[in-house]
Amino acid sequence: MTANMTIVSSIFLLLSMQGLAQDSPETILKLLVQKEQRLVDAVAVGDKPVWQFSLDDSCIIALEDGSVVTKEKQLEDLNPLPPSYKGIIKIIEPQ
């Protein structure tokens, strides 16, 4: 990456951060809840692209049993519920 591209990228990053910093905490919370709701909605139907887009390639996920999985493993294990099952997760009181 050239020095000019680095400078331009840095300027865009700073401008986007400044815009976010001007949002109220309620607005930021609303955006986070919307993002989280999209992720949990994708679980029951096995919508891998939603998770593919949201997770960094280097992320790791700590599961409830203490095990740790990579993004690749998480996507591999994400499958829709069987046809006879239905389920939803609704975020109702984020804190």
Image (cartoon, grey):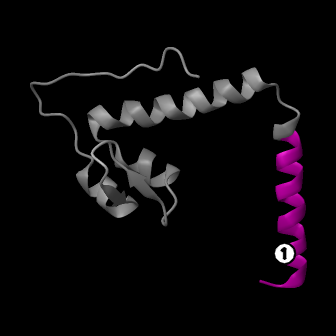
Q: In this view, does 61 lie to the left or right of 80?
A: right
Instruction: Give coordinates of residue 77: x percent, y percent.
Output: 24, 52
Quadrant of the rendered image containing residue 35: top right
Query: Magenta residues?
Result: 1-19
Q: In which quarter of the image is the N terminus?
A: bottom right
> What x and y, as percent, mark residue 18?
89, 44
Q: Residue lying farthest top?
A: 92
Q: Above or below — where is 36 with respect to 51?
A: above
Percent across and percent down for residue 53 are 50, 52
Query: What kind of element bears circle 1?
Result: helix
The residue where tag 1 is placed is: 6
Residue 90, image quadrant: top left
The residue depicted at 49 percent of the width and 54 percent of the height is 55
In the displayed image of the protein, which residue is found farthest to the left? 84
The three-letter amino acid code for the residue at tag 1 is Thr
Rendered-image quadrant of the C terminus: top right
Residue 71 lies, with reference to residue 81, above or below; the image says below
- Residue 60: horizontal and vertical position, in percent? 43, 59
